[in-house]
Image: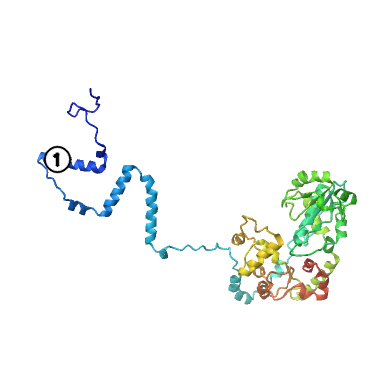
């Protein structure tokens, strides 16, 4: 009995025998087909069969072609093309690279982004001849110093309180860190926070900075008595914490709860987080305190800031006296400008340059100086794992301190000529011999405290108070 065949009958009654697996090969099917065609043509007598000798067939294909065809046929037959294709690709690439000389491979040079390099010295050299020949008659000082306020003068707009203060919620002790500007900001913020929390402010303590190395106290720089008196109706200020409070902490400030507050914290943080602890402990400490209050405080808080900055903070008598002396001498030396002059604080001291992480044109020596200054002042802050310093990006973002040369270019661009008197108020300029030279060329009438005051007048400010030595402006 035979299996049922659904295909049309081929004329034979018996079922067809399955084809041999060997006949499935494309090469064998081609040969079989050719033989069949040959037999067919031969049988019909109408065609002519063309036969190739082994020599002729070998000449049709080169050995390389035969090898390639053999490999491909094996891969296709075994369906291993997806396995061997990556290996063949890698082998081909290695072969290709071995035949090409590396001299012709293009070299990619990474150029610094525009604005990422300190190019002010080159700019100065281009503009120097024009500045030296500047004969313009426009007098910048006469227009810039014109009072723009319609009323003719600026007046303070701080409303002073006249009423008494409610019972205090406790004592607030803050430690101001940084240089003079940061410390002044800390004091103003401390007054604002103490008034908002209805706390008694202890005269702020100044951190001893490893760069400034200045042991000055609040009273050495500011008039402490005047500070307390001016704030009397707004914030209670004392210079000492009462003994009955300190007794609870064994007379040791390190036992007092210390808040580590994030920079630019909102006033609501002080209300929600700091005030409950103040009510509980009756004495809290905040260290460090520079820039720990945001600028967008409510008007009542801003008023206390302004009151502290513009009214309560007045320099101590020795500093005020020397400052008035320097001002009078600058007016005398600025007679050609009706006694008017410019006061400039360069903010280009070593610690400022180091903290900014900017690079100028000092090469490897500058890099060593800045690395050492950062380690002295901030001990590991800039070498933490994952900390990436990108001076080029910092410069593009406009966060690099202006060099004395750049300050000079800015002032000359505003219209001030070389006859303008300048009083330089700043600390020791980093690499001053190199950086100050172009500024002195642009403004030869520049004066410093050392030029205006005698050594005897400066002596009281040199013994351990280096910041006071740089303060009058």
Residue 229 placed where, x, y %? 88, 56
Quarter that holds the N terminus: top left
Task: From the viewer's perspective, tell me whether residue 448 is left or right of residue 30.
Answer: right
Quarter that holds the C terminus: bottom right
The one of 296 and 277 positioned closer to us in this rendering: 277
Q: Dividing the picture into quarters, in which one does residue 407 lie? A: bottom right
Is 361 situated above or below 46?
below
**Label 1 element class:** helix
Q: Dividing the picture into quarters, in which one does residue 410 lie? A: bottom right
Residue 417 placed where, x, y %? 67, 73
Residue 187 placed where, x, y %? 79, 56
Question: Which residue of the protein is positioned furthest toward the left in this rendering?
Answer: 45
The one of 400 and 94 positioned closer to us in this rendering: 94
Which residue matches tag 1? Answer: 39
Residue 278: in sight, yes or no? yes
Q: Dividing the picture into quarters, in which one does residue 10 lie? A: top left
């Amino acid at each position: 009995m035979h299996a049922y065949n659904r295909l049309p009958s081929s004329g034979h009654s018996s079922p067809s025998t399955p084809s041999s697996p060997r006949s499935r090969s494309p090469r064998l099917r081609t040969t079989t087909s050719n033989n069949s065609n040959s037999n067919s043509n031969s049988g019909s007598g109408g065609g002519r069969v063309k036969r190739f000798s082994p020599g002729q067939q070998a000449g049709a294909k080169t050995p390389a072609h035969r090898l390639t065809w053999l490999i491909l046929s094996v891969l296709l037959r075994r369906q291993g093309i997806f396995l061997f294709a990556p290996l063949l690709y890698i082998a081909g690439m290695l072969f290709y690279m071995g035949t090409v000389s590396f001299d012709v491979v293009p070299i990619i040079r990474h150029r610094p982004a525009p604005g990422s390099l300190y190019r002010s010295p080159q700019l100065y050299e281009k503009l120097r001849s024009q500045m030296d020949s500047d004969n313009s008659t426009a007098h910048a000082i006469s227009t810039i110093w014109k009072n723009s306020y319609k009323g003719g003068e600026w007046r303070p707009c701080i409303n002073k309180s006249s009423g008494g203060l409610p019972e205090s919620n406790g004592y607030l002790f803050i430690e101001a860190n940084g240089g003079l500007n940061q410390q002044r900001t800390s004091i103003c913020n401390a007054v604002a926070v103490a008034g908002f929390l209805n706390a008694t402010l202890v005269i702020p303590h100044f951190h001893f900075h490893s760069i400034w190395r200045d042991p000055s106290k609040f009273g050495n720089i500011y008039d402490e008595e005047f500070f307390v008196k001016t704030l009397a109706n707004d914030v209670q200020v004392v210079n000492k914490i009462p003994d009955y409070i300190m007794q609870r902490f064994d007379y040791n400030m390190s036992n007092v709860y210390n808040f580590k507050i994030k920079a630019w914290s909102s006033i609501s943080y002080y209300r929600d987080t700091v005030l409950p602890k103040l009510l509980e402990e009756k004495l809290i400490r905040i260290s460090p305190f520079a820039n720990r209050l945001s600028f967008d405080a409510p008007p009542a808080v801003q008023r206390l800031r302004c009151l502290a900055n513009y009214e309560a903070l007045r320099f101590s008598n020795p500093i005020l006296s020397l400052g008035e002396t320097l001002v009078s001498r600058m007016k005398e030396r600025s007679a050609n400008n009706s006694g008017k002059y410019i006061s400039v604080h360069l903010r280009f001291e070593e610690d400022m340059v180091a903290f900014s992480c900017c690079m100028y044109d000092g090469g490897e020596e500058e890099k060593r100086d800045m690395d050492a200054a950062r380690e002295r002042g901030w001990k590991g802050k800039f070498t933490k794992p994952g900390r990436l310093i990108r001076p080029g990006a910092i410069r593009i973002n406009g966060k690099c301190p202006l060099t004395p040369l750049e300050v000079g270019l800015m002032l000359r661009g505003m219209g001030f000529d070389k006859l303008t008197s300048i009083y330089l108020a700043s600390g020791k300029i980093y690499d001053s011999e190199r950086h100050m030279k172009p500024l002195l060329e642009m403004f030869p009438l520049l004066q410093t405290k050392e030029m205006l005051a005698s050594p005897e007048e400066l002596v009281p400010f040199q013994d351990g108070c280096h910041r006071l030595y740089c303060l009058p402006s």
